[in-house]
Image (cartoon, rainbow, N blue to C red):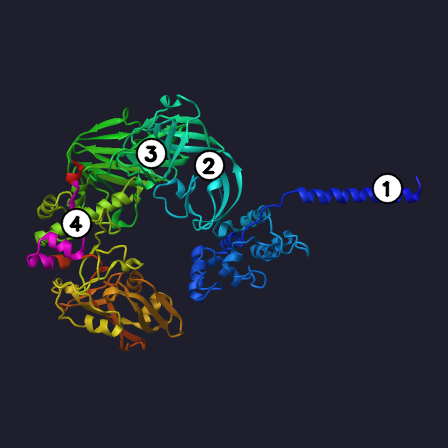
Amino acid sequence: MSKRGFVIRMGGVVALIALLIALILFLEPEKPGISRAQAAKAAALFAVSREECIQYREEKGSSHFTEKEKNNWYTVYMDYLFDHEGLSEEYTESTAAAANQELTYREAKRLVGFLGKNYANRVNLNQSNQKLPFPADLWWQIYEDAAKDKEEEGLQTLDVVLYGTPNHMENGEAWICYTDSGDFRFEGLALESWVDRKIRIFVRNKEIAGVSRQLSSTVVYENVWLEEVSGGKLFIHAGAVPRQFSLPEKGMDSEIQVHHIADLTLNEGVLEKIKLKKDRIQGKVLAVGEDFVEIEGYGVLSLADNFRVFKVYGEYEEQTKANILVGYDLQEFVAAEGKLCAALTIRPFNGERIRVILMDKGFTSLFHEQVSLTLNCDAVISFGDKEKNKEQLPAGTQLTIAPGDEYLKAQRAVITPFADRDGICLNSLTRDQGTPVYGGILEIREEEGKLVLVNDLLLEDYLKKVVPSEMPASYEMEALKAQAVCARTYAYQQIIGNSYSQHGAHVDDSTNYQVYNNVASDARTDTAVDETCGKILFYGDNPAYTYYYSTSCGHGTDGSVWGGSGESLPYIQAVELREERRTLDLSTNQGFAAFIKNTEIPSFDSAYSMYRWNALYKGSTLGNKLGMNWITSIEVTKRGPGGIVQEMVLTDADGKQKICSDQMEVRRILGSKDLEIERKDGKVIDGWSLLPSAFVSIEETGTAKDGSKLFTIYGGGYGHGAGMSQNGAQGMAKAGKNYQEILGFFYEGTELRDVVAARE
């Protein structure tokens, strides 16, 4: 072949290849892009949360969008990116029309660079594609790789099965979707096409940044509740989401047993297989841990990964593990493949019993090196397999049990006295009354080489040893009754709260909760408990939080004493402790100083010695306590309702500052056992590690012998100041008020209900 022919032939080949490439490009469908709004949301949430974007714009006080458009869901993300080099108004208009159009290659280069400069190179930007849509699949490939570096900073990559969206629920919350890994917000995203699919999502602070891809169209809905079969359809609850599926075979409805747990296999959203889980066990729950439940008679049982809790009596409700209350048998547990896969709450909580951890001497620890006890009546001790390992123990038996003891070979021994009250004397404990005795059941658990003691007893018996420990038995009967109702309501809340479930208890016996059995029971406090038996304060449909404290300064505070606005506890209000229940403006230092220095202001508890008090503090002593130089200035910078100190700044001689940001910190900083406190009655007492209250005014009042400044603390009251003043209740009772009136004063809008009647 001639040279010229070869060239012509090769030219033809090249032309043909070029033609084929052009044809392929022409015939290949253009890959879908991603809208600027959705890309902006993903990029912003890559760095910060939705809440931080909103806060940023509020603090800035302006938006790149017009007043008319700035409230669209995507503007907070785009505003953040405009100001943090993720977007540029040179290429991207700040308009609704532009936000809903597709992200271009030119914009993607910059936005991908916001994810990390090294990722920008993966955007192949050239002169011909600058204004072309950037492919969504490529965006999510890059995003997925970048997200791996953000896992420790709060951006999660999760593989989830999408159960449903608000379209699948009658009263579904807007923009909330439901998955096998929990509920998430998905504002601005379209998720309907992903329902019944396993997908990969990116989440920050429960907000979905985006969906990168589908992982599988075949999914298993694990541990769902089979509700009903009707008309060839199966009605289920997948967590909180009610769903319905057509049955795969005719006549299959007669084979399905409803009101059971099952695994459902779906392919492309079509039900293919149903696996029933029928094995159930029931017994008193002894402990609930992160990955186990201990059940009397069955021991410690592991939880399946997708363990669920459903309330199946009355109206169906998805619950959580926190609803599995130790000491009760409210649930039936569904077992499969050696693990618990679900708990079915089959009856309501009745609040009859409480489980109390007995702390060591001095209330310093939950754990004991050993326990020594004497039985005041006949009893039985159970250990190991409760059916085979029981011993009868006669009255007078003395036992000393330590870790590794034969009784603890199954990590638990249970002593059940035959008498209802005061059956066990714990010789290894000391309380103010001396050696304490306990009614009910004593469980001894071995945990990590130490012992945990749990007293399981009737709630009413518990209260008979709480009330005298919290209020003097000599107080007026109506005050004692008010205290009994508060204590019962508080205990009821704590049982529901299940704080010590991993140790098999609800509360401990210290001031962390309510002091129990520190002072011996008394006939008068027993009467107060008996005559209010079962009565609990409710606000609406929920038991109230009946916080109480010793003495007021003449004015209480509200729920903001523990942070927040106080609106969550509307029945606890900042009012004077007088008949009129006025609210005074004590927000200024000058106004509060005038109030607290006046010892003659009348109040229901103004007769009590801690109603007013004062103490002298040396700047050198305070500075040494804080590890600072001598304190030269103490300034109250913020007061809450009722004048309580919410923020205080201490400055030392070097200009170093210490900021106290809540009332408890104020009391810790200013408290000292070396402090001398002069009470209203003129008696001087030693201080405590906590200042009596944070209702204080602080003034510089001279110079100490060592040359440091002297500060006088003018204070009032004893305690946090929210809820019921116990001495205020006593004052009201002396004035002829009954316990219902006392409770109505301190917890306005609450209602007394009889839970005993509700149980029956």
Taking the image as shown, residue 576 lies to the left or right of residue 646, namely: left
Q: Which of marks 3 and 1 is nearer the N terminus?
A: 1
- Name the secondary structure under disc 1: helix
Which kind of residue does numbered mark 1 sit on? Arg
Look at the numbered discs 4 and 3 and tell me whether their residues touch, using CB distance below 8 Å.
Answer: no
- What is the span of residues highlighted in magenta in the rendered image? 730-755
Q: Earlier in the sequence, mark 1 or mark 2?
A: 1
Which kind of residue does numbered mark 3 sit on? Ala
Where is residue 304 shown, x and y percent of the image? 41, 34
Which kind of residue does numbered mark 4 sit on? Glu
Q: Mark 1 points at which residue?
A: 9
Quadrant of the rendering where the C terminus is positioned: top left
Taking the image as shown, residue 239 lies to the left or right of residue 443, namely: right
CA separation, marks 3 and 2? 24 Å
Front position among marks 1 and 2? 1
CA separation, marks 4 and 3? 32 Å
Nearer to the camera, 385 or 224: 224
Q: Mark 3 points at which residue?
A: 343
Front position among marks 4 and 3? 4
Q: Which of marks 4 and 1 is nearer the N terminus?
A: 1
Front position among marks 4 and 2? 2
Q: Can residue 458 be seen in this view?
A: yes
CA separation, marks 3 and 1? 78 Å
Looking at the rendering, which quadrant does residue 568 occupy?
Answer: bottom left
* Mark identifier at residue 196: 2
Looking at the rendering, which quadrant does residue 462 occupy?
Answer: top left
568 lies above or below 292: below
Which kind of residue does numbered mark 2 sit on? Asp
- Name the secondary structure under disc 4: strand
Q: Residue at x 22, y 58 (%)?
A: 722
